[in-house]
Amino acid sequence: MSRRDKELTGKQKAALLLISLGPEVSASVYKHLNEEEIERLTLEISGVKKVEPNVKEDIIEEFHNIALAQDYISQGGIGYAKTVLEAALGAEQAQAIINRLTSSLQVRPFDFARKADPSQIFNFIQNEHPQTIALILSYLDPGQAGVILSSLPQEVQADIAKRIAIMDSTSPEVISEIESVLERKLSSTVTQDYTETGGIDAVVEVLNGVDRQTEKTILDALEIQDPELAEEIKKRMFVFEDIVTLDNRSIQRVIRDCDNSDLLLSMKVSSDEVKEIIFRNMSSRMSDTFREEMEFMGPVRLRDVEEAQSRIVAVIRRLEDAGEIIIARGGGDDVIV
């Protein structure tokens, strides 16, 4: 890398890279940027008069190496990426690329664990303190976390789900200490940044990955421990747009049990996919009537739409509890055949 290249800022390098790649590729890149990033980058590009050939080559090479490093990280973590880059570029350049990536990518804690088998992780953490288990599960993929939560004893499942839901930020020292327990068994990756995880959305994702019995056991226990939290979780477990995941017979049953005015309001702002699957499960006469009423329906309040969708979701959950319909979830018991 030339001395001049080293003096360039990251924004200047990005501008020169896009100029070097040409307008068609640059336009594709712009699609992935927000307005502020586009504005700053465009301003930087507009100020460039000429790109020196040696600078252009250095920047493209640097970008290529960083792209390779990102690919290696996705395959086997930072340790694997560093080993491959050292073999290809030497220790000093490899370390420089890794440092640049880890400071910009904000690699999440327990990245190594997300590539591991859930049963393997379960064996390592099943006897840990519930708070430790909750922290680890909140960083895993929802599918992994759901399998592990289902495997834990029923008497601790609700406690761990609650801990995930109310979890906020965690210090890097605590994360590093917990990571080290798994590090010796699986892989290694440590971030020194304060990170946020957990929360209601996190526990909802985890519960969506467990089997129906585990979900019911946890929610029943939470209703006793913290009714408001249980209700908030249930509201988010199945949203109106998820109706597309139901089979046709179930959708037809939901249509019969829901108020037509609620269906009209809910479909007013729903996606085309949701509208079409609902129309497909109505009679031709009912479908024509709904389409006509929706066409002439005036503006509606978002709050009214959300309340209507909540009532429909409540009907769906009631039908599921009664065994009238099936909502596909993780676990073998809910596989639809």
Image (cartoon, helix red, strand yellow):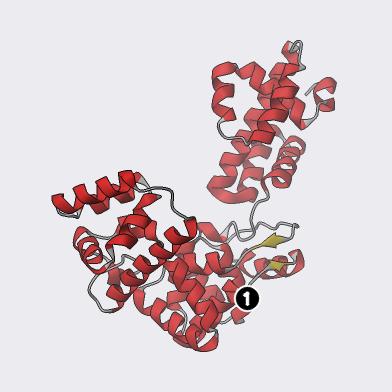
Which residue is identified by label 1?
132
Return the x and y of residue 76 as percentages of the image width and height: 56, 49
Determine the secondary structure under disc 1.
helix
Height in image: 20 above or below 127? above
Height in image: 94 above or below 299? above
Q: Nearer the viewer, residue 206 or 303?
A: 303
Residue drawn at (67%, 46%) of the image: 105
Height in image: 237 above or below 90? below
Residue drawn at (31%, 48%) of the image: 294
Return the x and y of residue 245 as percentages of the image width and height: 31, 58
Q: Amino acid at mark 1?
A: Thr
Return the x and y of residue 153 as percentages of the image width and height: 46, 84
Height in image: 209 above or below 30? below
Return the x and y of residue 226 as percentages of the image width and height: 55, 84
Residue drawn at (68%, 50%) of the image: 106
- What quarter of the picture does the C terminus occupy? bottom left
